[in-house]
Image: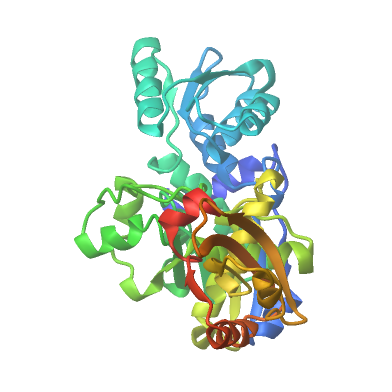
Amino acid sequence: MSFQEGARAGERAMRAVFPPTPLLRNDMLSARYGADVWLKREDLSPVRSYKLRGAFNAMRKVMQDDAVFVCASAGNHAQGVAYMCKHFGVRGVIFMPVTTPQQKIMKTQMFGGDRVEVRLTGDYFDDTLASSQAFCAEAGAHFLSPFDDEDVIEGQASVAVEIEAQLGHAPDHIILPVGGGGLSAGTRSYFGDQVHYTFVEPSGATSLADAVAAGAPVDVSPINTFVDGAAVAKIGQRTFARLASVDPSDVLDIAEDRICTTIIDMLNVEGVVLEPAGALAIEALADVVDQIKGKTVVCVTSGGNFDFERLPEVKERAQRYSGVKKYFILRMPQRPGALKDFLNILGPEDDIARFEYLKKSARNFGSVLIGIETLRSENFDRFLAALDAEGFTYTDITNDETLAQFVI
């Protein structure tokens, strides 16, 4: 059986569990980029990500009544495995780091019900993974990799099978988020050379780009885990074998703060809730606009498991990236009227979002941490010019990551 035949067989079998996710044309993005832009809405699967596809396909091939399935995950893979354990009526043991947010633990338990046991172990994922694999060896259980497994790759390729059926043909261009590579490997293996691909990674975890450059998977630790659904330190051996020949120019990375602008935009304008990894493909449209003019383009929105407690952070990152919010350390003269002089510098579209005035001594100047929001980024040109004209001394700390961890 060819890879394509296997992917189609897996996709047909999935229909007993859940319907195809929608493929929806997006008018806003189509008009913005001059292309026929479609969104493959994996955020609308039963577990709000595509991960249950690979879990289903791998589990169905080794299914036995007394089977025990094990995975190590703090996110979408855990939820997909839990959902499928309940569907198949088998036992699942899911290992999660002790630091996993309670919301993710609860969702995993909800999807798995009494068929799943969640074990919290290790502060870091590597420790969690080691514990899960040790348990597998001891109990004779089946370990379910989140991406580095041929059956998982074949299962993720069902996304491509559905796209082809829903469009009636292969798209001209497809944009895929990349973490461990399961979705990308499956999609590329299914469509082959008839499609132009763009693979998108978060800037803080460029495991595919580094592997392509080195000719083999490499560990890119330490990684930035903000885009948790695609923050993988080392791409899989099996997935890379299917991606090794990609053109390096087709592998992009996008800054974490920039991704936040798409999350906010899709939420405010389209009412679509995306997790950071789910927004990657849409944000990449701006980087390939010359390639996609007049073409049929599919962006895979890989997941929508967004914890709304993160929304203030996402908004903050989006504003800083867009240049409409900045932070400064300002030297304020210790004299009557100095604060009023500063306030008079603010324009009609400027607002103070943060103000901490620390007078630690009787010195002539005091330090102020101040955050300014404005409606348009160009307003800061006038604001900074006015500060200079009035003789204020200041330091822009907006992009100072070390200071930001402590004061922003």
Depth check, front residue: 130 or 38:
130
Q: Is 151 situated left or right of 283 in this image?
A: left
Q: Nearer the viewer, residue 221 or 5?
A: 221
Residue 189 visible in the snapshot: yes
Q: Is residue 313 above or below residue 122?
A: below
Indicate the position of residue 283 as horizontal and vertical percent values: 57, 70
Colouring scheme applied when the structure was drawn: rainbow
Residue 261 visible: no
Position of residue 166 measured from the top left corner of the image (x, y, whole percent)? 68, 64
At 66% from the left and 59% from the top, the residue drawn is: 354
Q: Residue at x 57, y 60 (%)?
A: 369
Residue at 63% x, 74% y is: 324
Q: In the rendered view, would you say 11 is above or below 329?
A: above
x and y percentages locating residue 101 in the rendered image: 59, 33
Residue 293: quadrant of the picture: bottom right
The quadrant of the image that shows the C terminus is: bottom right
Quadrant of the image occupied by residue 266 = bottom right
Q: Is residue 366 above or below residue 196?
A: above
Measuring 49% from the left and 33% from the top, which residue is drawn there? 73
What percent of the width, then of the height, locates residue 348?
77, 81
383 vs 220, nearest the viewer: 383
Of residues 185 and 98, the one drawn nearer to the viewer in this rendering: 98
Number of marks in the image?
0
